[in-house]
Image (cartoon, grey):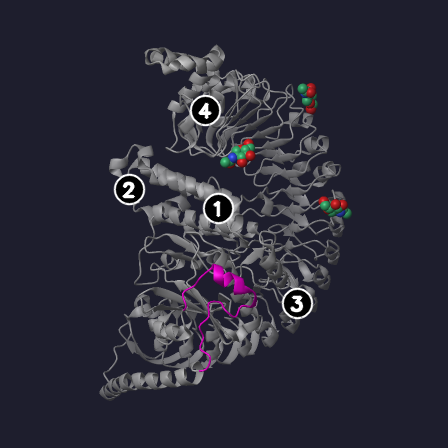
Amino acid sequence: MGFCKFPMFGFLCLVLVLFGVHAEENAQLMNDRASLLSFMSGVVSDPGHVLENWNSSDVHVCKWSGVSCNNAGDRVTELILNATWLRGTISPALANLSSLRVLDLSRNFLQGHIPKELGFLSQLRLLSLSSNLLEGKIPYEWGFLHNMVYLDLGSNRLKGKIPDSLFCNGSLSLQYIDLSNNSLSGEIPLKNECGLKELRFLLLWSNHLVGSVPQALSNSTKLQWLDLASNMLSGELPSNIVRETPSLEILYLSYNAFVSHDGNTNLEPFFASLVNSSNLQELELAGNNLGGEIPYIIGDLSTILVQVHLDTNLLYGSIPPHISNLVNLTLLNLSCNLLNGSIPPQLYRMGKLERVYLSNNSLSGKIPSALGEIPHLGLLDLSRNKLSGSIPDSFANLPQLRRLFLYENQLSGTIPPSLGKCINLEILDLSHNTISGVIPSEVAGLSSLKLYLNLSSNHLYGPLPLELSKMDMVLAIDLSSNNLSGTIPPQLKSCIALEKLNLSHNILEGPLPFSIGQLPYLRELDVSSNQLIGEIPQSLQVSSTLTHMNFSFNKFYGNVSNEGAFSSLTMDAFLDNNGLCGKIKGMPKCRKRRSSHHLLILSIILSLIAIPILCLFGYRLLLRSRFRSQLAVFNGGDMEDDEQENKEFKYPRISYEQLIQATGGFSASSLIGSGQFGHVYKGVLQDNTRIAVKVLDPKTSGEIFGSFKRECQVLKRTRHRNLIRIITICSRPEFKALVLPLMSNGSLESHLYPSHGLNHGLDLVQLVNICSDVAEGVAYLHHHSPVKVVHCDLKPSNILLDHDMTALVTDFGISRLVKGADEGVSEKVTESISSKDGLLCGSLGYIAPEYGLGQRASPEGDVFSFGVLLLEIVTGRRPTDVLIHEGSNLHEYVKRHYPNKLEAIVEQALDRSCGAPSAMPQAYHNVWTDIILEMIELGLMCTQITPSARPSMQDAAHEMGRLKEYLSNPSSLQLSSQKTAC
Ligand SMILES: *[C@@H]1O[C@H](CO)[C@@H](O)[C@H](O)[C@H]1NC(C)=O
Ligand SMILES: *[C@@H]1O[C@H](CO)[C@@H](O)[C@H](O)[C@H]1NC(C)=O
Ligand SMILES: *[C@@H]1O[C@H](CO)[C@@H](O)[C@H](O)[C@H]1NC(C)=O
């Protein structure tokens, strides 16, 4: 266009250029452009986001983000804007995109009704609006979508009936229908005259559907997944349908009101109809109140079957030994039925079993010793039956056994010492039986026990074994209601993770050791109904964690303060001790004793003088003897293969001496935490940098050294705002420490569960930001860091908060460096770890179920822990607490309330993190509720049993980012002026 040089042609030139662009767009494309613009005007996407290049004059419609055209470039055929932060409503104008074949607006915040006009998009093949906030009914007009193959409206708030037209007048080519997780009601409108012959996936779980499974489904002979769980469907189990659908892989009918044949007495016809489904992998019929015996023919089902859930029904009779033909089964759940007879020893033939639940039945006889031959058995729950005899010795052969529940039976005999060989056991519950004898030292020394040891209500006698002090990870020990005697060993203080200790109703004597009060996490202590004597130790009153205590029915005496941890106690905690006095209401007042008072003051004065002298003396001595020799200035220097890296990652040189000075000689007052791998001290360097010094315990040196090296390697290679940064490493043969910046706001743990004194919970904005930070940090470890890293131990105490409440993930002590990303180092490390896999990874309550069942540490395991963290934040309950009190995992507990019984959980979450519901504007209330619901959903997604079904950490980070955005952008709510505390 040479003549554009001449100014007088300028205007003409501009017109020509504009005309030029539009000339390429024919009339139809102009129409499509107008429809898209009209769609854009109904939604908000933040600046810098997806719709930014829409309607810019120099971008062709077909190049707009999310938009695709046909080959000729004259019609819009695809609009894909999933997970793009869209808010607002769906414009009916989209219906004018008459060549549209794919419309994906899933995973956004779209509200309002689904426009019925979309039903006129006759070319549409894929329509996904899942995971939005859409309300109202599914439009009748959708029956005109004759070419639809894939329809996903799951996880919205749709109500009303499913229109008949959708399944009947509609597309015959439908292969995938997902309407799950809405509030749809009425029957499933599939009539005989309408056959969905191509249907492979029908997902309608979690709605309010009633009626029976429509017979016409038997025309869908290619059906692979049928998930109707959690509705109110009734009628006989659909045997006529499953007989015609031999491709079934997944059949979920749990939590409905189905009955078995012959008036809910006969399960045989249904199981017989499933025999030809040779691809069946998972069968779930739980929670239906199904009657009848478990038919013999169950053993003739597909041997590919991996999971069978028949729990919470009314099944009676005995367990058919023939079931053991299902050799690929990993999970068998028959709990909560009326089963009797004995446990068939043949079960051992199912050599892949990992989890077996037979609890809450009337099973009798002995526990077959053959169960000890199931090599991968990780969980065995036989609780609440009528089993008798003794516990078989053969359990010693179960190296993978993690959880053993035998409580509430009639077991007798003694505890087999061989149980001590189950070196991965984390829960052992033998309570409420008639087991006698002493507690074998082998069992008391099970240092793997991470959650709880419950031997209460048995006939055990003898002393508390000293070996109990080896349980340094156990959270709860309950030995109550036995005949245990002797004294309480002060060594119990080595059980440093202990939160709950119940020794009540025994015949223990002697004093209550001072050291019990020093247990750093102890919250509940019950020593009532024993013969303990002496004063109640001061250490209990000054404990910052103890909240529940019971000292009643003993022989304690002395002055009891009503301060500190005792301030919340009443006289009920001190009944019948005769010798106690003090300010607790109902307790006799103490008489003043001058002499002892004076003595006390004297001793305080003495110690005030003596301690500094001793310290000074000792410190000098220490310096002279230990540090004059080769002084420890290391920049990770003695880590063999690190020479090269030290040059790359220059650390400031900080000597051991400086660390001693900074931490007051690693004094008790600067101790801020203890963990499996050592202690953490706070300190201030001379330049006023506040630091945390993580000193690794040299006692368990082999393991520790590995962990130290791993942590160093990980920390050195990672740079991210949500991962803790390393200041330096101090490493001598007998002293190894990491120096990290001190985070002024402590750990997330201390904010979620403030002990008395410190009482500021976090608000919703902070919580969402923290979760987003954590997800970003871990996603970096998984996807972007130079060495791929699996964190392995994600939990609130490993999340630190900066001065501005930015969350930083820490404690890579047990991280796994994943092979592949950075050969040199990672390969070696992976090898060295694999031998002890499963021993080190994770903390109870947060650990993925597949760990310990032969699975390696994996990114999916971290995603699981992150999911638990989300659910913990929303419910305000520790996963271990739920486990102890409800006997189920946190995610199972939440799932039981999902989606229709969440009100209480949501209300409590709002209460805790947003102030009183009455005080908040309705619009905020709605938004906050949405956010909490979304966090629950993400938490449940991340904690799915099947690792591959969980989202990636990157997806999770993306979701959290979306929520953060949604919450922090008040303009999107048109309410900016009213923003309140939350
Ligand atoms: C959007 O959906 C497509 C498949 O339809 C998927 O491949 C893609 O990852 C999704 N994008 C996001 C951001 O979730
Ligand atoms: C579907 O199957 C039923 C019998 O179950 C039959 O009567 C009906 O004709 C079939 N419909 C189609 C469309 O094939
Ligand atoms: C067990 O499952 C695997 C994987 O699905 C399959 O290859 C194998 O054939 C199954 N075993 C039997 C006996 O069916």
**Spot occupied by residue 800 in the image (x, y as percentages of width and height):** 40, 57
Where, quadrant-wise, is the N terminus in this rendering? Answer: top left
- Which numbered circle lies on residue 114? 4
Please name which of the two marks, 4 or 2, marks the residue nearer to the observer: 4
Where, quadrant-wise, is the C terminus in this rendering? Answer: top left
Distance Cα–Cα, label 1 vs label 4: 27 Å
Under mark 2, the amino acid is Ser
**Spot occupied by residue 486 in the image (x, y as percentages of width and height):** 50, 82
Q: Earlier in the sequence, mark 4 or mark 3?
A: 4
Under mark 1, the amino acid is Gly
- The answer to whether marks 3 and 2 mark residues whose Cβ atoms lie closer than 8 Å is no
Distance Cα–Cα, label 3 vs label 1: 38 Å
- Which numbered circle lies on residue 918? 2
**Quarter-of-image position of residue 249:** top right
Under mark 3, the amino acid is Ile
Disc 1 element: helix
- Vertical relation: 702 (above or below) 129: below
- Which numbered circle lies on residue 735? none
Q: Is residue 978 left or right of residue 375?
A: left
Q: Is residue 793 left or right of residue 425?
A: left
- Which numbered circle lies on residue 939? 1
- In the picture of the structure, the residue carrying the numbered disc 3 is 391
